[in-house]
Image (cartoon, grey):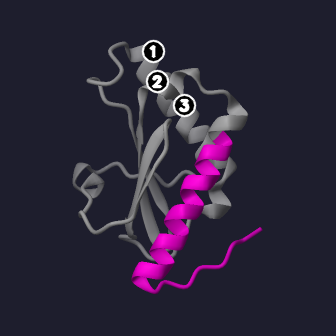
Amino acid sequence: MRNTIKNHKDFFMADSDPVALSALFVVRAKPAKFPDDPRYGVIAAKRTFKLAVQRNRAKRLLREWIRFHQNLLAPECDYVFVARFPILDADRESGRAAMAKALMHIQRKYVKKMGVSYEKNS
């Protein structure tokens, strides 16, 4: 899976879109621009991470955790992940657990709110 959001306007979210907060990142979901094709975008702000090496590490960790849990991405959604500073101190297992928890929260909230049917592909 390598379908990422590249266009600036695709990163904008509405207040009504589901959100999941973690100490390591924030994830938001919105209805997919292209049905049956989940896309994701990763943000590591310069305001949060002063050094480029920190921004790159944060994005690399998020992309790894997303790839590990790609079966939890609903095909009807586009996702935007925003890195938080504590992500730099996270280990692989805690990051993967936080990602799974956040994606499951989004999945439950999206299914409940929008009435989208989604079944896990495990």
Disc number placed over residue 56 in the picture, else none: 2
Q: Are marks 3 and 2 in contact (CB under 8 Å)?
A: yes
Residue drawn at x 48%, y 32% is: 59
Q: CA distance from mark 3 to mark 2?
A: 6 Å
Q: Secondary structure at mark 1?
A: helix
Label annotation for residue 98: none
Q: Amino acid at mark 2?
A: Asn
Percent x, y of residue 10: 28, 57
**Type of the residue with mark 1:** Val
Q: Which residue is mark 3?
A: 60
Q: CA distance from mark 1 to mark 3?
A: 10 Å
Question: Residue 62 location, x and y as percent?
Answer: 54, 38
Question: Which percent across, then down, holds residue 41?
Answer: 41, 48
Residue closest to the far right: 122
Dot 2 and dot 1 residues touching (CB under 8 Å)? yes
Magenta-tinted stretch? 96-122
Does 112 appear above or below 69?
Answer: below
Label 2: which secondary element? helix
Check if residue 105 falls in the magenta segment. yes
> In front: 12, or 15?
15
